[in-house]
Amino acid sequence: MKNSETGTAIRNRQQSEEDKIKDGFYTEIAVPEKKDEILEFLKNFSPEVHTNADENFDWLPDGSFSIVVMKDGEEILYADLFEDELTLGVGGWHTHYAGYLTDYRMFLEVLNEFIDGRRCAVCIKSNEEWMGCFTAGAEDLSETFLVKEVNELLSAREFQMKLKEYGYRIECCFLDTSKNKVYEIAAEKE
């Protein structure tokens, strides 16, 4: 489940142009007009809607929205709706979707996985520095699996040296924060 977005992208490349047209691959959508639908998906989380008229949201272009879900004073999810793009963020992870029907469907699929607790954001920090993020399915949260994923994601020598020298922290962030998990991976002593 970690890469359902990648799977969709591969399927999209393999489709014929005729099938892409039928499936909405090239069908543009008015992203800001999807605000009410997205709010309906998030209704159990008491989402807040912001525009550029709101304090700390002046970075939003006119006609755009930021939908934010807060818990205990902390932002746990946001969806930014721009004219031709959506951004979904959970924890320190985020991804972008183009303003096309197929991308919007993918956005809703991923959003539903977060809402249903089937997906979480996995963030890596070493020596209090953010190192990277990815998403994983709820069934993929063993320490062994996550360490393997971190080593693949942060395979560059400089990252590996830092992880070994300082150790690192893996934070699994769910919308239902009671499900959050944290793993502390110790530095490798020589």
Image (cartoon, rainbow, N blue to C red):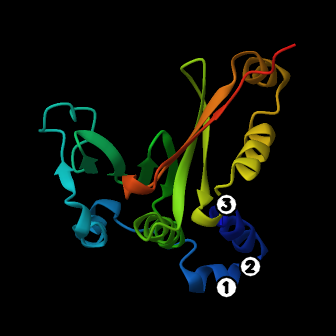
| Residue at 78%, 74% in the rendered image | 14
Task: Kindly state the secondary structure of the residue where label 2 is placed.
Answer: loop
Q: Is residue 106 above or below residue 76?
A: below
Left or right of residue 34: residue 53: left
Q: Are marks 3 and 1 in contact (CB under 8 Å)?
A: no
The residue carrying mark 3 is: 140
Q: How many marks?
A: 3
Q: Are marks 2 and 1 in contact (CB under 8 Å)?
A: yes
The residue carrying mark 2 is: 15
Q: Is residue 86 above or below residue 182?
A: below
Task: Kindly state the secondary structure of the residue where label 1 is placed.
Answer: helix
Q: Which mark is residue 19?
A: 1
Q: Is residue 81 visible in this depiction of the protein?
A: no
For marks 3 and 2, give the CA distance.
29 Å
Q: Are marks 3 and 2 in contact (CB under 8 Å)?
A: no
Left or right of residue 153: residue 20: left
Callout 1: 10 Å neighbours few (<14), some, many (20+)? few
Q: Earlier in the sequence, mark 3 or mark 1?
A: 1
Amino acid on which disc 3 is placed: Asp
